[in-house]
Each structure stands twice: as C-alpha cells, then as structure tokens.
Amino acid sequence: MTDNRRPHPATALDDVVHQRVRLGILTVLSEAHECRFATLRDELGLTDGNLNRHLQILERAGLLQVIKGYEGRRPCTWLRLTRQGRTALRAEVAALEQLVARIRAAGDDAG
Amino acid sequence: MDRDAATQAERTLAELDTLRQRAARRAHGGVWLPATGVATLLLASTALYATPFGDRYSIVAEHPFWAGLPDQQRSPVASYLFWFLGIPLLFSVVAFWYRWRAGRLGVRVPWRAVAAAGLGVLALLAVLAAVPTGPVPDGLTAGTGPNWEGLLTPLLPVAATVVALGWVERSRGLLASGVWILALAVWLCTSWPMGTVPGWMLGNDAGGQLAWRPGHYLVLMALPLLVTAAVTGVTARRAARD
C-alpha cells in the first residue's frame, strides 16, 4: 500500500539539478575536490559551449564555483562543488530513489 | 506511464552510479603512494632502535620517546632528526605527486589539509617537548595505569596524517589504519614496560606483557597501510588499463 497523504516524491525533484547533463556534472564534481573544465567536458562527452551553458546555470544557482587561473602561461578553469551543490545532489538522488520505490510499490499492490 | 517513469529513474540512477565510480577512481586512485610512503617511514623507523626485533626482555628507554615507541634508541638525536626531517620530506614528495596527478588527470585532492594535520601535530609535539632526551618520568612504571607524558611520540603526527589522508581521499581503509596506529601508539606509549596488558583483560590481578619488540609493533602498524595501498594501487592500475 502506498501512503497517498505524503507528497509525491516527484515534487522534490529540482528543475535546475534534475536535467541529465547537470546531474552528471554534479556527480563528477561530488567525487573530486576540484576538477578541470576540459576533464569534465571529456568525461561527459560535451562541447565547450554546451558545458559552459550548464555551468552558468549551476553557478547562478550557487551549486558550483568556477575558479579561473593559469597553469604556466595557459589559462585554466577549475570547478568545485559548493556545500549547497552537494546537498542538492544528495536530495535529488534521494528523491529519485523514493520515486522508484513508490512506483514499484504501487505496481506490486495493483498486481 | 508510471512504470516508464520508474524505469527511466532507475536508468538515471544506474548511470549516475557508474559515472560516480569512474570519477572516484580518477580522483582517489593516487592514494597508494602516500599510504606506501607513510608505511615505509614506519618500517624505516625500526632502524632507530638498539634491538628492534631481538632481546625480548629489554626495558630500557629514554623519554621523550623520539624513536616512536618506549624502547632503547641507538641515538635520541638521530631519532629526533629522522622524524622531524622525514615527515616534512614525505609531505614534499606527496605534494609533488598530487600536483603531477592534477596536471595529468585534471582532478585535485586537498593534500594541503593532510600536510596541515601532520605538520600541525608535529609542531605541537616540538613545542610540548623541546628537549630530545631525558629519564623515564616517575610514575611511568608497571601497574600505575596510563601516563599521558608517554604520548610525546612522533607516532601521533603519523596517525594524524593517515586519518586526514583517509578523510580527504574518502578511504575507509586509511581511516581505519590511522585509528589503528593511534590506538597502538596510545597503548604502547602510555604503559610501561611496553606491551603491558592490564589485568582486567587477562582475568587476573597482575596483568601481563606481550613479548614483542618495537620492530614487531611497527610492522603491525604498517600492515593495514600496505594492504590499503596494494588494493587501491591495483584498482587504479586496472581502471587505467580499461
């Protein structure tokens, strides 16, 4: 039996985080202290422009920090997850897991 | 419809898990080197003792225990120099290693936090015990219970380094190794003679003593570090090959 008085887990999904590429960005950054822009781009198989667009959205939401610097004479961008970003990722994964559990439980009840 | 949503959500979770595991291997695959470095330092410190593996009933020691464990040292000054030069040297190698990996793989590990923990405790030790030799303090005798003066040992910065390394590298193996080194150091350095087992553990009043020498205890301390280093090293190598 599912508890219909509780809010549906889908309402806990955050539009900013839920997008597939952005979930991937947050997941990779959650494992590293800091990650280079080019490394993240290659890991997710994106173009510079595409990754940039998603990074801007996440940075505006305060979920990640963009650190610009130099390595020798070469400009280099490093990315770091903020505490808020880590919390948002955890909440998103938890909401997805609850969603799956709820739908499966409802299916078992019906079957 | 709902079933499709559940399948989609499950697929997303599985993809995220694969991505997370790959990112973790890339970010933390270099931990084998500092773990091996610390283990090497511990094993090399057996050379500081007059009889690291023999002479089971020796109870001579000079306080503070600059060699690490309360046993006869070859030279307190050599022991002092070994740790006060060896630990910063180890951090230099670790710093170089993490910088090199960051340049090659594009992920950074906060190794400065590890260096701050290790060097911070080492500096504290230097402040607390400025004189590198002296007699065993009164009260640090068999049956008197823990004596906290015995904790003036370079094994504490080593334990702090391993715990901090386990924390930043998210390695349960290293965290456990750090706690293991700390527990052994506290037990061995606060009881006299070294290896004293309290009576309540043996079920008698007098207690007892393990007939082990400093070399044996140092091998015991280094063992979990070497196992962790071997496991992470092999995993990283396999991941690089795939």
Image (tube, grey):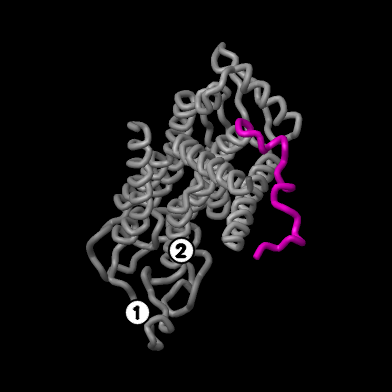
Is B55 above or below relative to A13?
below
Give the residue type that dot 2 points to: Ala
Query: Do dots 2 and 1 share one subunit?
Result: yes
Chain containing the residue with disc 2: B
Q: Position of residue B212 (x, y in %)?
A: 29, 67
Give the residue type that dot 1 points to: Gly
Mark 1 nearby-residue class (10 Å; few <14, some 14–19, many ≥20): some
In the rendered structure, does residue A21 fall within the stretch colored magenta?
yes
Label 1: which secondary element:
strand
Q: Position of residue B152 (x, y in %)?
A: 50, 58
Which corner quadrant of the image does residue A29 belong to? top right
Residue A2: assigned label: none
Identify the residue under disc 1.
B208
Q: Position of residue B70 (x, y in %)?
A: 39, 62
Which corner quadrant of the image does residue B71 belong to? bottom left
Is B92 above or below relative to B68?
above
Of all residues, the one furthest to the left in this rendering is B54
